[in-house]
Amino acid sequence: MSAWFILAALNGAIAVAAGVLEAHGLRGRLDAEALEIFGIGARYQMYHALALGLAALAMKGEAAPRARIAAWLFVVGLLLFCGSLYFLALTGVRAAGYVTPFGGIAFLGGWLALIWAGLKLRS
C-alpha cells in the first residue's frame, strides 16, 4: 500500500506545483485558453491524486485487488488526461486533445473500480 500512497502524495505535490505555475509562471506567456486548459489539468490531477490515495487506503483484505485496479486506472488517467492537457497548453499541439478522452474514461473506470472495492471493505 505504501508505494501507492506515496505516488498519490507525489501527484498531489505536482498538482500544487502546476497550480502555482499556472498562477504565477505562465500568465503572460500563454493565452487565456491555454491557461484554462493547463488549470483544468492541475485541478483534475489534484482530484485524482486524492482518489489514488483513497484507493491506496482501500487496499485491505478482499478489497485489495479491486482497489489496485482502481489505482492503476487513476494512474493511467493522470498520465493521459492531465498529461495531454499540460502538453496541449504548453505546446499548442491540438492533436494532444485526442488522447484526453481516454484519460477521462480511465478516471471514470477508476471511480467505478473504487466503488467495486468499497463493496468488499469491512468496517
Image (spheres, rainbow, N blue to C red):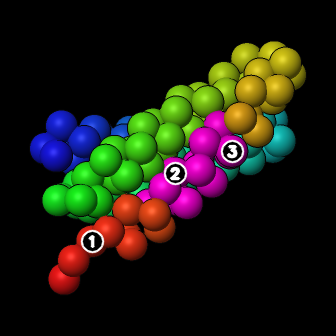
Q: Which quarter of the rendered picture does the C terminus lie within?
A: bottom left
Q: CA distance from mark 2 to mark 1?
A: 16 Å
- Disc 1 residue type (three-letter): Leu
- Disc 3 residue type (three-letter): Ile
**CB atoms of marks 2 and 3 within 8 Å:** no
Magenta part mainly helix, strand or loop? Answer: helix
- Highlighted magenta segment, given as a residue range: 103-114
**CB atoms of marks 1 and 3 within 8 Å:** no
* Residue 20, percent from left and from top: 46, 45
Instruction: Write down the residue under mark 3.
Output: 105
Give the residue drawn at x 38%, y 62%.
Answer: 117
Q: Earlier in the sequence, mark 1 or mark 3?
A: 3
- Disc 2 residue type (three-letter): Gly
Q: Secondary structure at mark 2?
A: helix
- Farthest-out residue, bottom: 123
Closest to the camera, between mark 2 and mark 1, is 1
Q: Earlier in the sequence, mark 2 or mark 1?
A: 2
Specify whether 5 is left or right of 35.
left
Specify whether 9 is left or right of 69.
left
Disc assigned to residue 121: 1
Specify whether 37 is left or right of 73.
right
Question: Would you call the spot at circle 1 few (<14 residues within 10 Å), some (14-19), or many (20 or more)?
Answer: some
Q: Secondary structure at mark 3?
A: helix
Quarter of the image holding residue 30?
top right
* Residue 18, percent from left and from top: 48, 40
Disc assigned to residue 110: 2
Question: Would you call the spot at circle 2 few (<14 residues within 10 Å), some (14-19), or many (20 or more)?
Answer: many
Q: Nearer the viewer, residue 97 or 17?
A: 97
Q: CA distance from mark 2 to mark 3?
A: 9 Å
Closest to the camera, between mark 1 and mark 3, is 1
